[in-house]
């Protein structure tokens, strides 16, 4: 593979892809730390902030489909550059928006579109095309682990930027830093994407989508990914405020989010590696069942810094570990011709879950003064997701043979 002139070196693809995901995912994982500074200074409710983040997740899902189609047809390079520019504009707008409406437009729509062009669907499309099938799940685990390392690295950095510079200047600094994605995109510029696709196509995008939505296993994976989005975005955005409401210091929340990122480095890598050796549906079912148990135990034990750190470490090992096996199953069933697009459709379900998780957290808190209902929903949905992943069929789909030319 490495001698094929039409392929990029595997080390280059992994290094540049991992660095892009580290920046993009690392920045977004810290957005919960801006909830209280922004709402307190601007006089907004938590629901206002949560709604903008909910719009962001929904926009990410919607634009993810379009970004996936563009990446499959034009290559990841152009999509990454456009995404980086949108990310910078969105972060600057997040800092400078004077009204809730403009805040929702910049923090929600712009950053959501940017994330669609700078995260997993686009990067995994490159991995699927450039890395052999026998190493694909492992490579996806490496990229997901990089995103987790980004959370571990960036969340404390963002906390210090807020502390030292104030929340507005901190966001402006990040808007400049995210432009580093542009030079990294050159390392993912695939040979053969000068106006034509690199992978030989036997299906149109529309035919590939129709095939997928008629295939039960694709729908089961989609349902499970909805739950993943609900759980991780609710916890990532609202846990800092949940901890502060219970008298714990902001440093505890910062360390907790960093621990989630650190342990997810190991969780995603292990999930990707195991995906080469065992049924991916069993890996996914275990992850979702385990999340439900971990959240239930966290709510039952007395809340303390120690319980928060233990919870963060364990839930971190399960955090994005769904990503490598889910995307690897998509490639395994349908092939890599339209992988970014199909991953984008599944991810759209993830983002609908994210929308509901983050918005319901703010909505129900403002009305009940508690996050309890959403915690309980997270437990129930974890059990549901574990069950729906068990019957997934991972074999390559059987397509009718194309008629031979006379």
Image: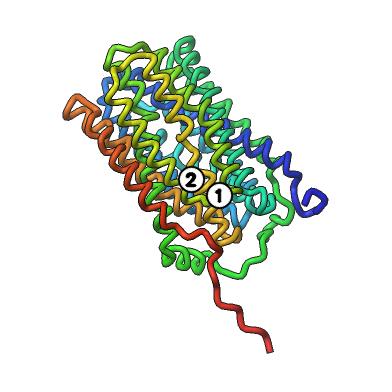
Image height of 404 relative to 389, above or below: below
Contact (Cβ within 8 Å) of mark 1 with mark 2: yes
Residue at which label 1 appears? 278
Residue at which label 2 appears? 283
> In the picture, which quadrant includes the C terminus?
bottom right
Name the residue at 36% across, 44% down.
227
In the image, 83 versus 224, the foreground residue is 224
Image height of 171 relative to 9, above or below: above
Q: Position of residue 228 (x, y in %)?
A: 40, 42
In the image, 145 versus 52, the foreground residue is 145
Q: Position of residue 144 (x, y in %)?
A: 56, 38
Name the residue at 41% across, 35% down.
106
Image height of 201 relative to 133, above or below: below
Q: Position of residue 277 (x, y in %)?
A: 60, 48
Name the residue at 37% across, 14% down.
305
Q: Quadrant of residue 18?
A: top right
User: Would residue 254 be found to the left or right of residue 140 on screen?
Assistant: left
Answer yes or no: is residue 141 visible.
yes
Total number of numbered discs in the rendering: 2
Name the residue at 69% across, 52% down.
132
Secondary structure state at the residue bearing disc 2? helix
Residue at mark 1 to residue at mark 2: CA–CA distance? 8 Å
**Label annotation for residue 231:** none
User: Would residue 2 be found to the left or right of residue 142 on screen?
Assistant: right
Q: Position of residue 215 (x, y in %)?
A: 44, 65
């Amino acid at each position: 593979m490495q001698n094929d002139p039409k392929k990029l070196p595997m080390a280059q693809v992994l290094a540049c892809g991992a660095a892009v995901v580290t920046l993009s995912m690392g920045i977004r994982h810290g957005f919960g730390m801006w909830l209280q500074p922004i709402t307190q200074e601007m006089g907004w409710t938590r629901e206002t902030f949560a709604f903008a983040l909910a719009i962001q997740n929904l926009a990410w899902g919607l634009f993810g489909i379009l970004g996936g189609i563009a990446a499959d047809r034009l290559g990841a390079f152009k999509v990454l550059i456009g995404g980086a520019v949108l990310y910078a504009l969105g972060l600057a707008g997040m800092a400078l928006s004077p009204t809730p409406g403009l805040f929702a437009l910049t923090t929600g729509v712009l950053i959501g579109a940017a994330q669609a062009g700078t995260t997993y669907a686009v990067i995994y499309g490159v991995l699927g095309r450039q890395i052999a099938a026998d190493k694909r799940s492992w490579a996806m685990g490496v990229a997901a682990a990089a995103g987790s390392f980004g959370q571990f690295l960036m969340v404390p950095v963002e906390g210090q930027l807020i502390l030292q510079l104030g929340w507005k200047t901190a966001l402006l600094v990040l808007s400049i830093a995210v432009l580093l994605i542009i030079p990294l995109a050159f390392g993912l510029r695939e040979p053969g994407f000068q106006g034509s696709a690199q992978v030989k196509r036997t299906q149109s995008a529309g035919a590939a989508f129709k095939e997928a939505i008629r295939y039960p296993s694709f729908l089961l994976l989609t349902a499970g990914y909805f739950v993943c989005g609900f759980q991780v975005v609710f916890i990532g955005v609202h846990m800092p405020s949940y901890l502060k409401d219970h008298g714990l210091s902001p440093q505890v929340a910062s360390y907790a989010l960093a621990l989630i990122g650190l342990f997810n480095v190991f969780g995603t890598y292990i999930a990707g590696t195991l995906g080469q050796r065992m049924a991916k549906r069993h890996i996914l079912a275990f992850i979702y069942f385990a999340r439900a148990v971990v959240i239930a135990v966290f709510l039952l034990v007395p809340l303390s810094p120690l319980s928060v750190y233990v919870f963060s470490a364990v839930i971190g090992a399960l955090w994005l570990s769904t990503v490598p096996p889910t995307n690897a199953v998509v490639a395994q069933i349908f092939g890599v011709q339209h992988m970014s697009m199909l991953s984008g459709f599944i991810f759209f379900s993830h983002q609908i879950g994210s929308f509901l998780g983050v918005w319901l957290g703010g909505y129900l808190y403002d009305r009940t003064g508690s996050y309890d209902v959403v915690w309980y929903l997270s437990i129930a949905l974890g059990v549901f997701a574990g069950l729906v992943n068990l019957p997934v069929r991972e074999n390559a789909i059987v397509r009718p043979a194309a008629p031979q030319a006379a």
